[in-house]
Amino acid sequence: MGTLTKTVVLLYVTSAVLCTPFVNQLQPGQEWPTRSSVKQPYHELVQNETDTKSDSVATEVEVVAEEEKAPEEPEVPDDNNPKVLAEEVERIDYSGAQVWKVSTKKSSTQRLINQLASEKLIASWGGNHSAIDILVKPNALENVTAALKKKDVAYYVMIEDLQQRINEENPPLDENELELQDRRGHRMTWKQYHRLEDIHGFMDYLAKTYPSIVSVNTIGKSYEGKELKVLRISDGKQGNKAVFIDGGIHAREWISPAVVTYFINQFAENFDVESDDIKNIDWYFLPVVNPDGYEYTHKSDRLWRKNRKYGYGPSTCTGADLNRNFGYRWGGKGASSYPCSDIYRGSGPFSEPESKAISDFFKNTATKFSAYLTYHSYGQYLLYPWGYDNALPPDHKDLQSVGLLIAQAIRKTGGSEYKVGSSSGLLYPAAGGSDDWAKSLGIKYTYTIELSDTGRYGFVLPASYIEPVARENLAGLRALASVVNKLD
Ligand SMILES: [Zn+2]
């Protein structure tokens, strides 16, 4: 960017920091069931695909075969021994950059947008069939205006100065909040976007405070060695259903971990008085799937999306899009093989430690999940599979009707409108998403939830929105819980 200013900070990441010892915070008697501890078959296949292609059922064998077919990477650093010993961190300044909503009603617009993106004048923030949001770099404002006017493409400016929005997004807590924080035993609030340390501290605090219902387990490590912490809330009843919820796959979507931790707080702190629908479910939460990326958005580039695995290909570009890296139909439409792309799929299915850890967790667990929810932003959508192409799973009518129930609960509570549909149909095909993979394991109610807003703030949603967005989505989650409880 033309007016990009750099604050250079030297960050020393020592191997001691990278290799924090495994701390199993599970309480005695709280071990989570693994397949080796519970001898029961695990439903893994999606039966009776409506998609006619014969290879549409993912089995572990097929996933392994895909891994073998994956292209060789020249020099990929060892996951267990990242070579990030001293990293130069720049804070990227987005002063003067704007975000525009561009109408895509004319069929030629997408081509024009792709061309402007390839010339690095703009970056796509996402869109649907009628409009796309683009970040326009400050030195490109004139050129992009001219290009759109020439083709008679309608647009309007959503964000006049992106850096100003970034500066105002996450103000410090006031004195009352700070005082409360000191008394509470953890630093987490839902009035601010918190760093990873606060989120993990909060999870550990709950496990310590409510050992009979809350337990925390580290299911793996990120590329930089940060823990992937899953918190479970369960009263241990036989016959409970199970739901898995994750957030923060994409680093810059800060509202996602904030909402997921809000759910955790609500259920853990009020479990005794919660409804039976909530108590009859074993809840698993992974609020930050991409901790390296999340921290990077706090320290360096607010708009980073991918993980932080370094040294991809000859280009030395950093990071893969974790939501293009899951092992079902990996490498298909809407995912890039170019390592510098924001939607780079990685070198193979589950090539990234973060997605691999989730995959391993599901491979090893004896828990049969009835729902998988993955929270993203933005756009206000409830999306169900398939994402890889315009195809629908056999039970798509159930997914649509339950999606509408969730949307209704959200609207009644907070007034926000969420559109419901398959991700490929409502938005665009994108292969390698976690939702498709979860569905391929046989998890019935699988949704990607794109939280607020619809573009006024986009990824840079002010922290004052956390509570209202979380509250209405908690109502949506309750609607899902009641459906899950009625399953056989
Ligand atoms: Zn996302």
Image: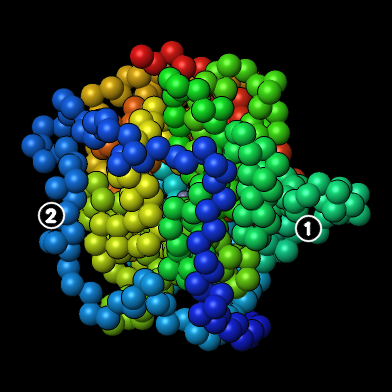
Mark 1 Cα-neighbour bin, 10 Å: few <14, some 14–19, many ≥20: some
Q: Which residue is mark 1?
A: 171
| Residue 102, x across and y down, in percent | 48, 51
Q: Which residue is mark 2?
A: 65
Q: Label 2 near label 1: C-beta < 8 Å?
A: no
As rendered, which of 438 and 274 lies closer to the eye?
A: 274
In the image, 248: left or right of 339?
right
Q: Secondary structure at mark 1?
A: loop
Give the quadrant of residue 267: top right
As rendered, which of 313 and 343 lies closer to the eye?
A: 313
When the figure is inspected, residue 358 is found, relative to residue 314, above or below; the finding is above
* Disc 2 residue type (three-letter): Ala
| Residue 329, x across and y down, in percent | 21, 48
> How far apart are the alpha carbons under marks 1 and 2?
49 Å
| Residue 75, x across and y down, in percent | 27, 81
Question: Which residue is drawn at the image coordinates 10% and 37% (left, top)?
Answer: 53
As rendered, which of 487 and 326 lies closer to the eye?
A: 487
Residue 15's mark? Answer: none
Quadrant of the image containing the C terminus: top left
Question: Which residue is drawn at the image coordinates 54% and 46% (left, top)?
Answer: 26
Q: Disc count in the image? A: 2
As rendered, which of 244 and 431 lies closer to the eye?
A: 244
When the figure is inspected, residue 418 is found, relative to residue 216, above or below; the finding is above
Residue 268, can we see it?
A: yes
| Residue 404, x across and y down, in percent | 46, 21
Question: Which residue is drawn at the image coordinates 33% and 50% (left, top)?
Answer: 360
Give the quadrant of residue 340: bottom left
* Disc 1 residue type (three-letter): Pro
Residue 458, can we see it?
A: no
Question: Which residue is drawn at the image coordinates 61% and 86% (left, top)?
Answer: 10
Q: Nearer the viewer, mark 1 or mark 2?
A: 2
Q: Secondary structure at mark 2?
A: helix
